Amino acid sequence: MKSQFLSTKPLPISFCLILFLLPLITSVSGDENEHYKICGNLFNCGNITGIDYPFWGNNRPLECGYPGLKLECEKDTTIIETKTLKYRVLDINQDTQVLRITRMDLSSNICQSKFVNTTLDSELFEYASAYTNLTILYGCSPVILPVPNQFDCPVKGTIDRIGYVVVGTQIPGMCHASIVVPVTYKNFGSFQDVSKLLDYVGEGFEVQCKVDISACHACKNSRGRCGYDFASNQFTCLCPNQSPGSTICNSSRSSAGITTQQSPAGMGSSESSGSGMFVLPLH
Ligand SMILES: *[C@@H]1O[C@H](CO)[C@@H](O)[C@H](O)[C@H]1NC(C)=O
Ligand SMILES: *[C@@H]1O[C@H](CO)[C@@H](O)[C@H](O)[C@H]1NC(C)=O
Ligand SMILES: *[C@@H]1O[C@H](CO)[C@@H](O)[C@H](O)[C@H]1NC(C)=O
Ligand SMILES: *[C@@H]1O[C@H](CO)[C@@H](O)[C@H](O)[C@H]1NC(C)=O
């Protein structure tokens, strides 16, 4: 009686220990999978939907994308900021990684309080298609008249308010400031209609994202999700049941037998995985 009582006593203790440890164990593996789970969120904002690596932002934390490729969503408008300028994103082609963007500071008013040239972050972007540079000149003195299609803007630091637009890249010269703005290629000749300037600017221009996503494709093909590891400053493949640090996920098939992966060409890998799925329950 007594020994039986003693022997049963440790059982509830170990049982309690297991109960206590179980959530700890699952939460540890849960942490490892947290990035996998959260990077399954795609970026959606207005007309821009289903955006994945290398972009992050909104419900995709920075571990889910490449540094500098943060998208913001404001009232159904997708915004990317690069080189101190905010651009509205009109379109993202996920297959080609081409974005169509337009400067937000020129979305509704030609007058500017701050003059910034359009400069791409050459680490991240390059022009994707033919474009035309327009130079908008501000604060020009009336001496340089006559110029067709002037506009009028107050400019801090000068009493001269005349502005105009020329095709190509131009220094301010006798004007207070000039900014260069790319627009989709048009054979302008000379710039004739300043009232259409904001329309041209609003159409945006195409940039190619230079971040290599081939590793991400391989990762996705192994059922992983793409992420970025800030410890090693490189791409990482996030996998459902695997600690981070790999470039692709180990599938359940390869952990069942490496030989299936090394089987000669001719045997489709999907075929062998299919037969493996049928064989396993029989064992
Ligand atoms: C979404 O696309 C439609 C059709 O292209 C366009 O009319 C609309 O302005 C777009 N909305 C936003 C928020 O970009
Ligand atoms: C546009 O202007 C930038 C400088 O602002 C220059 O680097 C670029 O080559 C120009 N592109 C074209 C097509 O003229
Ligand atoms: C923009 O670029 C042009 C041509 O390189 C330059 O002359 C001008 O000063 C620049 N404007 C600003 C605001 O930096
Ligand atoms: C993936 O599988 C390979 C070979 O089966 C093994 O050497 C490696 O440690 C595995 N990696 C992880 C992160 O499980």
Image (cartoon, rainbow, N blue to C red):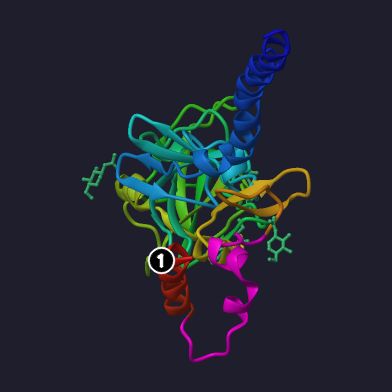
In percent of width and height, residue 87 lies at 48, 42
- Label 1, secondary structure: give it: loop
Which residue reaches farthest right? Answer: 232
Which residue reaches farthest top? Answer: 2
Quadrant containing the N terminus in the rendered view: top right
Residue 82 appears in the picture as rendered: no
Q: Which residue is mark 1?
A: 185
Magenta segment, which residues?
Answer: 247-268
Image vertical order of residue 60 relative to residue 235, above or below: above
In percent of width and height, residue 191 lies at 39, 58
In percent of width and height, residue 102 lies at 43, 47
Does the magenta portion include 249? Answer: yes
The residue nearer to you, when weighing 234 against 128, is 234
The residue drawn where x is 46% and y is 83% is 268
Image vertical order of residue 257 relative to residue 216, above or below: below
Does the magenta portion include 215? Answer: no
Where is residue 255, by image quadrant? bottom right
The residue drawn where x is 63% and y is 15% is 12
Q: Taking 178 as reference, is 1 left or right?
A: right
**Is the CB–ligand 2 distance for label 1 below 8 Å?**
no
The residue drawn where x is 48% and y is 61% is 97
